[in-house]
Image (cartoon, grey):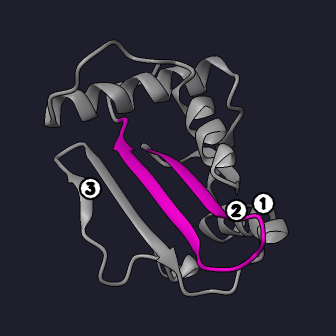
Amino acid sequence: MEYLEAFDGSRPAIDAEKILIVRGRSKKRIGPQEMNLELENLFSFLEAEEVDMFSKKAASLISIMDEHIRASVKIQGETDAGGIHKMKENLEAMNFLVNYKLGFIGKIGFFIVLWKDKSGIGPCFVEIVLSNTENSLE
């Protein structure tokens, strides 16, 4: 994703027919307090529809993403609807500020998370999960 200058040279964590997960470091100088604004600007740039994380639509999208991931790699345990919040809590416990959003561009659902050390030192890390939701959502 060129907008965040984050994935040049990155290899996908998962690259399957219906799911793509990529992690990287942004080359942009994004301060910890600017991460939410960066996400807002990204959604505007992409003309993406933001989804409320506590909505029925978000639950459906997260479930679809989980299905697509499980179809690609073996995962022990059940789907954890609170997994996103637990991820945020774990990163915050390691002294990171975390911002994330869930959205759609057409039939592609995506989850993007930014995290950076609270001190402002070091890069801003980015992870995006893209999932083909065609024929999956109501």
Q: Are marks 1 and 2 in contact (CB under 8 Å)?
A: yes
Say left or right for 114 vs 126. Answer: right
Instruction: Measuring from the top left, give residue 36's x and y in whole percent.
Output: 78, 60
Identify the residue at image location x=49%, y=75%. Answer: 25
User: Under tag 1, what secondary structure?
Assistant: helix
Residue furthest toward the right? 33
Q: What's under tag 2, amino acid-wise? A: Leu
Q: In front: 55, or 88?
A: 88
Kindly report the distance in space between the C-alpha atoms of the residues bearing marks 3 and 1.
Answer: 24 Å
Range drawn in magenta: 109-133
Question: Would you name the residue on which mark 2 appears?
Answer: 39
Q: Earlier in the sequence, mark 3 or mark 2?
A: 3
Residue 131 horizontal/vertical position (percent)? 36, 43
Q: Residues within 10 Å of mark 3 (few under 14, many from 20)?
A: few
Distance between the alpha carbons at the discs numbered 1 and 2: 5 Å
Residue 13, numbered label:
3
- Quadrant assignment, res 45: bottom right
Residues at badges 3 and 1 in contact (C-beta under 8 Å)?
no
Q: Residue at the location (69% across, 52% down)?
A: 98
Residue designated by label 1: 36
Residue 68 % position (x, y): 26, 32
Amino acid at dot 1:
Asn
Q: Residues within 10 Å of mark 1 (few under 14, many from 20)?
A: some
Residue 99 horizontal side relative to residue 4, left or right = right
What residue sits 47% from the left and 28% below the top?
62
Q: Say which element carries label 3.
A: strand
